[in-house]
Image (cartoon, coloured by chain):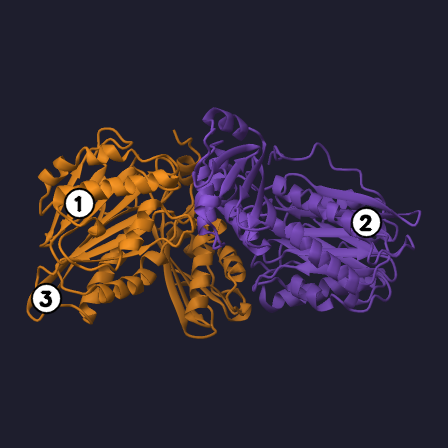
Chain colours: A purple, B orange
Amino acid sequence: MAVSPLAPAAFPSLPVINGVRFASASAGVKYKNRTDVMLAELAEGSTVAGVFTRSATRSAPVLDCQAKNGGPSRGKAAILVNSGNSNAFTGKSGVVAVEGICNGVAEALGVDTDRVFTSSTGVIGEPLPWERITAVMADLRAGLSDDGIAGAARAIMTTDTFPKGASAEVTVGGKSVRIAGIAKGSGMIAPDMATMLIYIFTDAKIGHAALQSLLGQITDKTFNCITVDSDTSTSDTLIMAATGASGVSVEGRGDFAAALESVMLDLALQVVRDGEGATKFVEVRVSGAADDADARKVAMSIANSPLVKTAIAGQDANWGRIVMAVGKSGARADRDRLTIRFGDIVVAENGWRAPGYSEAATSAYMKNQELVIGVDMGLGSGASTVWTCDLTHGYIDINADYRS
Amino acid sequence: MAVSPLAPAAFPSLPVINGVRFASASAGVKYKNRTDVMLAELAEGSTVAGVFTRSATRSAPVLDCQAKNGGPSRGKAAILVNSGNSNAFTGKSGVVAVEGICNGVAEALGVDTDRVFTSSTGVIGEPLPWERITAVMADLRAGLSDDGIAGAARAIMTTDTFPKGASAEVTVGGKSVRIAGIAKGSGMIAPDMATMLIYIFTDAKIGHAALQSLLGQITDKTFNCITVDSDTSTSDTLIMAATGASGVSVEGRGDFAAALESVMLDLALQVVRDGEGATKFVEVRVSGAADDADARKVAMSIANSPLVKTAIAGQDANWGRIVMAVGKSGARADRDRLTIRFGDIVVAENGWRAPGYSEAATSAYMKNQELVIGVDMGLGSGASTVWTCDLTHGYIDINADYRS
């Protein structure tokens, strides 16, 4: 599949995170001739925290990670991820598969099974051939290296068109703290469904409660603010590990939180840029809502509207569809106080088309690859920004194909 | 545009409803060489009730109808509908247009303006050239006839691919009561957005409160149970008029309610059958939910899921996407109690693919033009049925075109 036109120029150069080693391997879970398993080994005492899908039909590995999240940070830890099969809706065999993989990792690395976190991404409802994964465990262990993160980013791809990585560095008390993360998502799965997996590593020192709280807060501003097609995965997983190898404690540090937010936002926006069939990257900025919750309702209603997304694909300055999406959102709205902007162009205000509206200028703006849709509700100070992409024939092509 | 492959063979033969006369005309609101205005004149004392969009950005005619709904049933009444322009988000000029049209109808027919109900459907945000409509008022009055309903059904079409009508007859105390209705919808508007307009007429006698209550209840089981693309119109309007010409009172009559429901359901399903780009008609039946509200959440989550709808377009028995849609719906769910059926074929149960699952048999079923997706939640007695269509390249073609 061709790389998304919205992809970054290249995979970024990510810093080594002391205390983490990566390996990847080809287990043949489903795909041939590519890597499909990644292993991250985390130094003794690493803090591991996670944020997971709220789907009521969560996969077996997600349920296992949630049960382990918040356990004691004793000894080493590990993360193992496979692509090609999501081990979701696989009944008891799914639980057996997770146990098999966790036991394999625990034995190979000398880690407590309670400290092994796994993710699986790919087709739903097929039993996961987990023995293929444990069969390459010795190879994975032998291949562990400080600089294997780029390989790991590739191994977790399904039909993503590019691997996704981001990093940041903060200086705390004259000492450097590093953050590096990888993600997969919005490529379609073989062909099943868009899922999102994110793994972030830092050499900072931070306790589980503080890290978990930080992840939750920042997820609400980053990964929970993107949408490709309004569908929610059974497998969405974000796991972050803090090895403490820098010796620098970051609890309560706003600069660390800001650096982490920049990494998470960068990864989230890369997921949108790899949205299925996407040709336009769209930021939806809502302000002036009665409160933040209302602003988010409006922003998501616009970002998820098939009529808005197809108009964007058609480069059509169809602001009537924005009015429609505001109206259906459920948020408090006063038609006569609405202002709608495409970029800096005011297209509608005071309940009608803006007096100086120029169809030519607005149409020219819509030809940009990156668009900003601004809506001011004129009611209060509630604000929300979300990111999405357009809805194109490419999306239909990818998702109307037969699974096999 | 080609007629939808899901269209009925022909427009039905609708009975004359005593007390109603119809006319249609070409006012040139936007379209050329076709009718675009319909007028219905309602006999003295007719009860008129309505159900309207809940959009916060409702159009001027919708707001006007809502203000008039429930007024005294004195004298004649009238309904005037134009296509080509929705008079939505048109500021004060929208109110002026509604007043202009209502005054024109009132003068032409000798009706109180409080008894003139108007609807407009078409592009948003353009001022409605209402004088073009009042200019043909004399022609409309001259053209009024008992059997003009089929012409009316055509005049309200926008990019609908076929006119929609349905009727029923009930015998009450040896006397016949007739119901006839027309609808437009899910064709895309010029090209702006899917809207739904429905007008139903009966010669039954019924008071406003009883008719309004009946309409609300039945709307929840019919028009509120269909979805094409999850987008909600600024103009959705259902108006029903009871002329009383049969002399038969139907208040509290279950058989009348059942007949009305059959007409409303028939019209609603015709709207789905004209869904933009639709090639498959899909009934989603959810049972065994914790309550009816949960069942509806699950049914709508499935019916609105782009991944489910593209799989159906691809004739793919992708039940994993049904699991996904159940999971994201927000309804109470227990993965291990879920049963999923395509037609009579059980594809998944007890948290896993059904033991006897046959990919070949299920794939053969998916080639049908009419499909039933059944989900039993295994939790309680909550149930809900909704109807939708698939998501195809045709939808993108229609909606990614430029408006002009």
Which chain letter matches label 3? B
Q: Amino acid at mark 3?
A: Val
Residue where numbered disc 1 is placed: B106
Classify mark 2: helix, strand or loop. helix
Residue extending farthest left: B174
Q: Nearer the viewer, residue B253 or A155?
A: B253
Q: Quadrant of the C terminus of chain B?
A: top left
Horizontal side of residue B246 vs B38, given as left or right:
left
Marks 1 and 2: in contact by CB < 8 Å? no
Percent x, y for residue A398?
52, 42
| x and y percentages locating residue B355 in the rendered image | 50, 66
Q: Marks 2 and 1: which is nearer the front?
A: 1
Numbered tag placed on residue A90 in the rendering: none
Which residue is pictured at 22% across the width and 35% down the height? B133
The location of residue B272, given as percent across then percent down, is 33, 50
Q: Are discs 2 and 3 both within one chain?
A: no
Report the residue at 50% width, 66% height from top.
B331
* Amino acid type of the residue that numbered disc 1 sits on in the rendered structure: Ala
Host chain of mark 1: B
